[in-house]
Amino acid sequence: MRWLIFFLLLSVSSTSFAQKFIFPRLTQQAKSVEQLIPKNWKLIDSAKGDLNQDNKDDIVLVLEFNTAVDEDRAYGNYEIELITETQKPRMLAVYFKKDELYRLAIQNNDFVLRSEEGGKMGDPFKGLRIDSNKFILSFEGGNDWRWKLNYEFEYQQKEWALVAANNVYYHKDSGEMVDKQYDFVDRTIKTVVGSIFNRNILNYKEEDILFFGSRRTLKDFKKPWTWEITKDNYL
């Protein structure tokens, strides 16, 4: 499974050595969204909603650099399996609304998948939304065998904790599917095995206790597919 995930995601690779791309430090506060976007970057998605339960509309931004550069990206173990790819870097930023200003809550330069990391399906980034004080990132990619990923983050004790995730792996023609639904609050994992065309008919469903050490946060969870929750089971 580990190597299959590698080939699903890998589209452009290089062994050349280049100067490491330096991400800008985002503006700490501003009155408008336009003032938050750095030079040579563009906004590709955003969502507004209350994230810190103060009844004000905070904002989450996904930004993309205008030019493709060489980036070291990870598949599997982030420490040793780095692949140099030429693509446009992306950033995730969360701003809290306070006193009519957007104030930076977190900047993450790794987690949002790049446009070249979706295989034949193209750009894997499928959207961003805010629901019930949480923000959700959605990705999808692959070739004949395809995958869908959803990650749900919540602001807890000044950290952005991963509270839930969904990982669907399926074949586009046969419909063969494995759907894993992770709840990191209740520590459960629901697994559905069967057909993506008949999700509620004749599919095998199982619920187990989810064993893991500490919950991951957006700060230490480098990017999708780099958390080995159980042996050869990556999220």
Image (spheres, grey):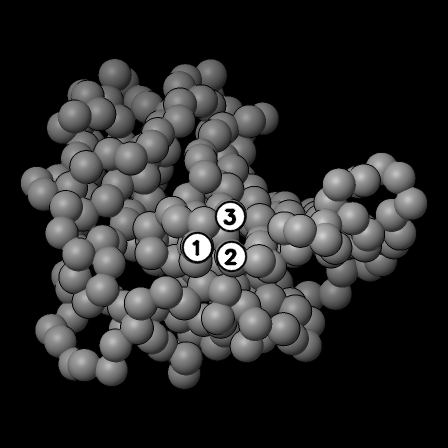
Q: Amino acid at mark 3?
A: Glu
Q: Residue at x 14, y 28 (%)?
A: 35
| Vertical side of 60 occupied by 79: above or below | below
**Residue 209 placement (x, y as % from top left):** 82, 59
Q: Which mark is residue 140?
A: 3
Q: Which residue is mark 1?
A: 120
Circle 1 crowding by C-alpha within 10 Å: few under 14, some 14–19, many from 20: some
CA gap between label 1 and label 3 equals 11 Å
Q: Looking at the image, can residue 218 be seen?
A: no
Relative horizontal placement of residue 145, taking residue 27 as reference (left or right): right
Q: Which residue is mark 2?
A: 142
Location of residue 84 (image quadrant): bottom left
Q: Amino acid at mark 1?
A: Lys
Circle 3 crowding by C-alpha within 10 Å: few under 14, some 14–19, many from 20: many
Q: Nearer the viewer, mark 1 or mark 3?
A: 1
Q: Nearer the viewer, mark 3 or mark 2?
A: 2
Relative horizontal placement of residue 36, taking residue 191 as reference (left or right): left
CA gap between label 1 and label 2 equals 6 Å
Relative horizontal placement of residue 191, taking residue 143 as reference (left or right): right
- Of the residues under marks 1 and 2, which one precedes in the sequence? 1
Location of residue 74 (image quadrant): bottom left
